Image (spheres, grey):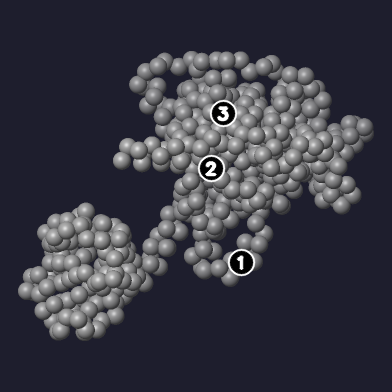
Amino acid sequence: MKRALLASFAKGSNMPDLRWMPDEGFTMGRLRIELLSGLTVALALVPEAVAFAFVAGVHPLVGLYAAFLVGLITALIGGRPGMISGATGALAVVMVALVAQHGVEYLFATVVLMGLMQIFAGAMQWGKFIRLVPHPVMLGFVNGLAIVIFLAQLTQFKVPGTAESSGHGMGGGDWLTGWPLVTMLGLVALTMAIIWVMPRITKVIPAPLAGIGVVAGLVIAFGIDVPRVGDMASIQGGLPGFHIPMVPLTWETLQIILPYAVILAAIGLIESLLTLNLVGEITGKRGGASQECIAQGVANTVTGFFGGMGGCAMIGQSMINVKSGGRTRIAGIAAAVFLLIFILFASPIIEVIPLAALVGVMFMVVIGTFAWNSLTILRKVPKMDAFVILLVTAVTVYEDLAVAVVVGVIVSALAYSWNNARRIHARTRMSITDKGAKVYEIQGPLFFGSSDGFIELFDIAGDPDTVIVDFAESRVVDQSALQAIEAVASKYEAAGKVIKLRHLSRDCHSLLTKAGHLMVDSDDDPDYELAVDYHVRTGILGGH
């Protein structure tokens, strides 16, 4: 037994592939694509990190340091090359209450604990459970997140400074009007047009980078008065320094940070693993879920000790990266390094970039991310799947991603259970081998959803003295199924009749034997060369 456990652990602990270019060969052309893609992502990271820092109620550098550290570490040891991680809005909206009530030091402690939880989840190989997320939930997640990204960009259409001074979110701040609004919209449209046209002209430079460069050049050359990155906040700073969170190491502190850490860890892993699947579909690569959990955990643990707000995978920036040609770890590493260079040396240059150019890039991400085909298939797929797509989309927009995915999985599971519960039925016939006995050939799974229907299949009063229940085309799944079998057996026993079970599969046989229901003289193997009938022992689970 010990040897089997060790073998199982060793099998699940294979060393991850941490090569910078696992599939693509190293060439100068590939390196150029990766570096330019990383630069594009870094430019798009700046306003996002600053905006999410404002949402969380912390200094902009706290968001920028998180984008740098989380982005760098996940790029180095993450489960999917090409993914981009950083400070995200999904986590920021949870952090704001903690920061407002207890201060930023408690946030840093929470991020450390959040990271440790994610490392534990990865070590336990829990990342594989993302496979349980149905495809309709994935579509709803993609559509909902695309809408969230779109709505987040609308705050850039407010007069600089008013959104932060009058509250967070869509409700605060004064909107641009008149020519400033027209100019902003025009530059956004120009950026989107360049991104759309550029790949048809040349692919030497990533289209988003070309859009940012051209629009920024026009704004600077003609002195066009539009909101710029520097209007949000200064991004200038030094290297992030090691900093132990200044919180008392007491039980009371743990009670404060633990609920937030659990929620943040769950949201971070769900968003990261769903983004991992999405990037995997685009790049044609699979696997790495548990390794991504570990990478996210290490990144957040380190970030908490270096004054960052933590983070997770960013679907918008990941889409920018893969659409710009980024396929290796080099792009993610380059994005993080460029972001640090911006903070240390190039803040005056980055701060003059018009927000309109970055908004245009994100709007193109929204167009590319939204699953437009889901609109056409809503009438073609089962109604429940269509409902789940719409439900997850709506909950993602109005609540948050973690709640949306959990709700979608629960609804899908309940629908699956209901469909299977309706499948159970029985064919009846008189037995050929046992004269006078009646055979119930059960069809469909026997589990909690179908247990009541199973009991209703039998005519206890009208059946002969011997009844055989044939499970050749059924499966006994759970405790509710055991309870149902015992209930039926008890009713026949009370009526002075005998019930036998036939054609149990190996798993059914094992389940019933473990519960103590099967009355057998030896550990027989349920092979079907010879049909074996089992008598049922009642009174074990209290069935009656």
Return the disc, 1 or 3, that comes first in the chain's sequence: 3
Q: Nearer the viewer, residue 268 or 285?
A: 285
Residue for point 76% across, 36% down: 26
> Residue beneath label 1, please?
377
The amino acid beneath tag 2 is: Ala
Residue 157 occupies quadrant: top right
- State the count of labels: 3
Residue for point 45% across, 17% down: 247
In the structure shown, which secondary structural element does the residue marked by tag 3 occupy? helix
Q: Which mark is residue 289?
A: 2
Return the disc, 3 or 2, that comes first in the chain's sequence: 2
Q: Which mark is residue 299?
A: 3
CA–CA distance between discs 2 and 1?
A: 29 Å
Residue for point 36% across, 41% down: 4
Left or right: 336, with 480 as reference point = right
Residue for point 78% across, 31% down: 228
Left or right: 456, with 236 as reference point = left
The amino acid beneath tag 3 is: Ala
Quarter holding the C terminus is: bottom left
Coordinates of residue 344 in the picture (x, y in percent): 74, 19
CA–CA distance between discs 3 and 2?
A: 15 Å
Left or right: 180, with 92 as reference point = right
Return the disc, 2 or 1, that comes first in the chain's sequence: 2
Q: Are marks 3 and 2 in contact (CB under 8 Å)?
A: no
Q: What crowding class fits label 1: few (fewer than 14 Cα within 10 Å), some (14-19), or many (20 or more)?
A: few
